[in-house]
Image (spheres, rainbow, N blue to C red):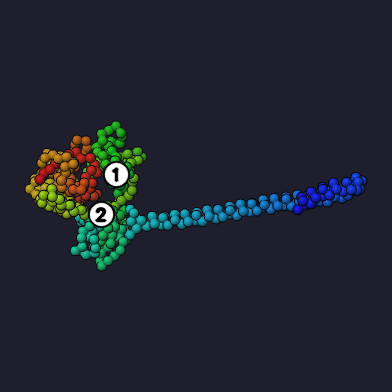
């Protein structure tokens, strides 16, 4: 409006000059100029004031957004702090990954059943001194989870509470879990030495000694070295093992099927170096020797010696009941019984005892058919 007033004033002055003459108009012009100056001043003042208000509003909005962002960050920081405290509290009450720890108090192994009752189906074996998470209690049975096995065990064979935690501190071992598809196990801690074997992903290896670049490990009953970057270290207790029944197919004879089922019935049993007792402890060749003897095949107590019996078969020809031999390079030092579906049962080591494994968890040297 004020700009329009100034413009009208200029037009008015032009008209006045024409009618009244220059002298009169000069006097009137001075008065008008004064009015125009006041109008311009007021206009500029309002513009400056408006700009100041806009700036003040922008600053206020910016400040409000900054305060809001700060409050949000503080809130997130508090949440993170609370989560961290919860994790710390959980870790303080956790040992080897268990919060409600139970440890198997048996001389050999404890059957894990599908339901609470002696007649329920066996779904796994919990070896002596193995750990488990106690999930619930039911009529004198514990519902537990250990490794890949969940089921029920008799509560009176499980140590719990502070006694279990104290025992776990003595029993736990550092394990190296393979975190890549395959990894070399070497004879010495360098890349110029002999490759003993190749081990596959997720295989757990007992740590003998830790190093920055190389980890000395135990594979079955042998020692070797693995590059530290290809394994993850953790403290572990022994775990339950799934109870596997081999599938019966047309190409598997009754004797082979029976042999495999007999071998599987000892899963969870003890490993004893040089042992030949299926109940008190066996080593790898002691296990195969005793199982084969039950079916009329008499083998020496030596994995290398057993490899000279039967006839050779390729890995693609394997049938349940065949023996698979492992070792370092071409030297045989371990033997297992093939049970079908790409799996073996074997007396592995003092930590795991008799267990089921992937048949190609390490590179086989040869396979022999005894029946």
Comes first in the chain, label 1 or label 2: 1
Which residue is tagged 2? 240
SS of the residue under disc 2: loop
Q: Determine whether label 1 and label 2 are within 8 Å by CB.
A: no
- Give whichever of 94, 367 is nearer the camera: 367
When the figure is inspected, residue 367 is found, relative to residue 295, above or below; the finding is: above
Quarter occupied by the C terminus: top left
- Total numbered circles: 2
Residue 296, given in percent of the width and then of the height, sits at: 7, 48
Given this view, does label 1 or label 2 mark the residue nearer the observer? 1
> Which residue, as the protein is rendered here, is positioned at the far left?
296
- The label shown at residue 79 is none
Assess disc 1: are there few (<14), some (14-19) or many (≥20) residues with their C-alpha within 10 Å of its C-alpha: some
- According to the picture, the residue beneath numbered tag 1 turns out to be 201
* Front in this rendered view, residue 201 or 275: 201
At 32% from the left and 44% from the top, the residue drawn is 179
Residue 105 placed where, x, y %?
24, 58
Provide residue 70's location: percent of width, then percent of height: 55, 53
Cα distance between the residues tagged 1 and 2: 19 Å
């Amino acid at each position: 409006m004020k700009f329009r007033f100034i413009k009208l004033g200029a037009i008015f002055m032009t008209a006045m000059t024409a009618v009244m003459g220059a002298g009169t108009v000069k006097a009137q012009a001075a008065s008008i100029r004064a009015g125009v100056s006041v109008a311009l001043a007021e206009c500029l003042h309002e513009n400056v004031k408006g700009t100041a208000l806009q700036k003040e509003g922008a600053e206020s909005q910016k400040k409000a957004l900054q305060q809001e962002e700060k409050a949000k960050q503080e809130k997130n920081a508090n949440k993170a702090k609370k989560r961290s405290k919860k994790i710390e509290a959980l870790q303080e009450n956790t040992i080897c990954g268990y919060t409600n720890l139970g440890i198997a108090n048996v001389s050999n192994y404890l059957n894990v059943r599908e339901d609470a009752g002696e007649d329920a189906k066996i779904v796994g074996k919990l070896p002596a001194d193995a750990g488990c998470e106690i999930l619930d209690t039911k009529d004198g049975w514990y519902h537990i989870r250990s490794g890949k096995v969940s089921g029920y065990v008799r509560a009176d064979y499980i140590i719990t509470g502070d006694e279990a935690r104290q025992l776990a501190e003595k029993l736990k071992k550092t394990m190296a879990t393979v975190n890549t598809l395959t990894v070399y196990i070497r004879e010495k801690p360098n890349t110029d030495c002999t490759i003993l074997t190749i081990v596959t992903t997720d295989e757990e290896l007992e740590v003998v000694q830790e190093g920055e670049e190389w980890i000395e490990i135990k594979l079955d009953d042998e020692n070797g070295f693995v590059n530290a970057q290809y394994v993850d270290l953790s403290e572990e207790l022994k775990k339950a093992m799934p109870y596997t029944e081999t599938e019966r197919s047309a190409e598997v004879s009754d004797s082979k099927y029976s042999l495999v089922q007999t071998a599987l019935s000892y899963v969870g049993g003890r490993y004893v170096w040089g042992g030949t007792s299926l109940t008190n402890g066996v080593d790898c060749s002691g296990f195969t020797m005793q199982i084969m003897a039950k079916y009329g095949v008499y083998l020496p107590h030596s994995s290398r010696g057993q490899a000279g019996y039967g006839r050779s078969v390729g890995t693609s020809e394997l049938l349940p009941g065949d023996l698979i031999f492992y070792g370092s390079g071409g030297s045989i030092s371990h033997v297992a019984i093939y049970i079908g579906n790409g799996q073996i049962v074997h007396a592995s080591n003092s930590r795991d005892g008799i267990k089921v494994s992937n048949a190609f968890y390490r590179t086989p040297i040869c396979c022999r058919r005894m029946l």
